Image (cartoon, rainbow, N blue to C red):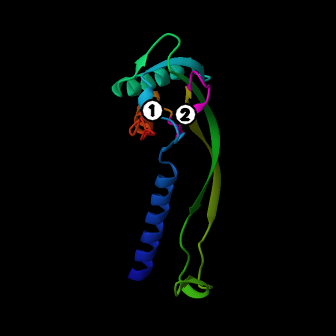
Amino acid sequence: MKLRYVLATLACAALVLSSAVAHADDVKTDYDHQTNFSNYHTYSWGTVQMADPLAAQRVRRAVDNALQQKGWQEVPSGGQVAIMIKGQIRNQQELQTYYDGLGGGWGRGWRWGGWGWGSGGGFGETTTTVNNVPEGHLVVDLFDSQSKELIWRGISSAELSNNPDKNRKKLDNDVQKMFKKFPPNSKG
């Protein structure tokens, strides 16, 4: 009886942990490894494509802050780097299955690792629901203004909350993560 309780507890803990990992913010960066980033010190804004004007302002401020902390300076036009941003929100479907019990016991049947759910019970009743979870996706591109070539890209994906303050904090944290190792190791 104790073993069944321990295994059921471990299974529940694994489900909770995997769910938490699946919803963690995902931030990635990439860059042109032939680019010498030490040649760049100024930037100008290009297009910022986002449906929410307030979110667009927040993204601009967060990127401005991150770049200025690195010693870069914004100029109204003619910067060495042009910044383009695209952000969107999509609904991601998430399936959640709930079990009302683990059944009446262990027996013969499907087995994994020597233990199994068997003919003495089963999982009990299950209910599966579909939830639409809003996810925000942000792409920050830096282009060399002269060559018009993409030199750096940051991408962030995160599950959004109904709380705007939480979303703002996520945005600020994700932009900081993007620019944490910026500028990348320069060529030369």
Amino acid type shown at disc 2: Ile
Whether 38 is drawn above or below 1: the answer is above
Q: Position of residue 72 (x, y in %)?
A: 39, 23
Residue 165: tell me if it is visible: no
**Considering the numbered disc 2 on the image, is that residue within a helix, a strand or a loop?**
strand
Residue 120: tell me if it is visible: yes
Query: Where's the C terminus, which quadrant?
Result: top left
Dot 2 or dot 1: first in sequence order is 1
Toward the top, the furthest residue is 76
Label 2 to label 1, Cα distance in Å? 9 Å
**Considering the numbered disc 1 on the image, is that residue within a helix, a strand or a loop?**
helix
Residue identifier under label 1: 37
Crowdedness near tag 2: few (<14), some (14–19) or many (≥20) residues, C-alpha within 10 Å: some
Q: Residue at x 48, y 20 (%)?
A: 43
Q: Position of residue 79 (x, y in %)?
A: 50, 17
Q: Residue at x 47, y 28 (%)?
A: 164
Q: Position of residue 96 (x, y in %)?
A: 59, 55
Contact, CB < 8 Å: mark 2 with mark 1?
yes
Per the rendered image, the range of residues in magenta is 144-161
Whether 127 is drawn above or below 6: the answer is above
Residue identifier under label 2: 151
Whether 177 is drawn above or below 79: the answer is below
- In depth, the one of 184 and 137 nearer the eye is 184
Crowdedness near tag 1: few (<14), some (14–19) or many (≥20) residues, C-alpha within 10 Å: some
Give the numbered dot on residue 76: none
Query: Where's the N terminus, which quadrant?
Result: bottom left
Quarter of image, res 6:
bottom left
- In depth, the one of 22 and 26 nearer the eye is 26
- In depth, the one of 179 and 116 nearer the eye is 179
Whether 96 is drawn above or below 101: the answer is above
Q: Is 141 part of what is drawn in magenta?
A: no
Prevailing secondary structure class for the magenta stretch in the rendered image: strand
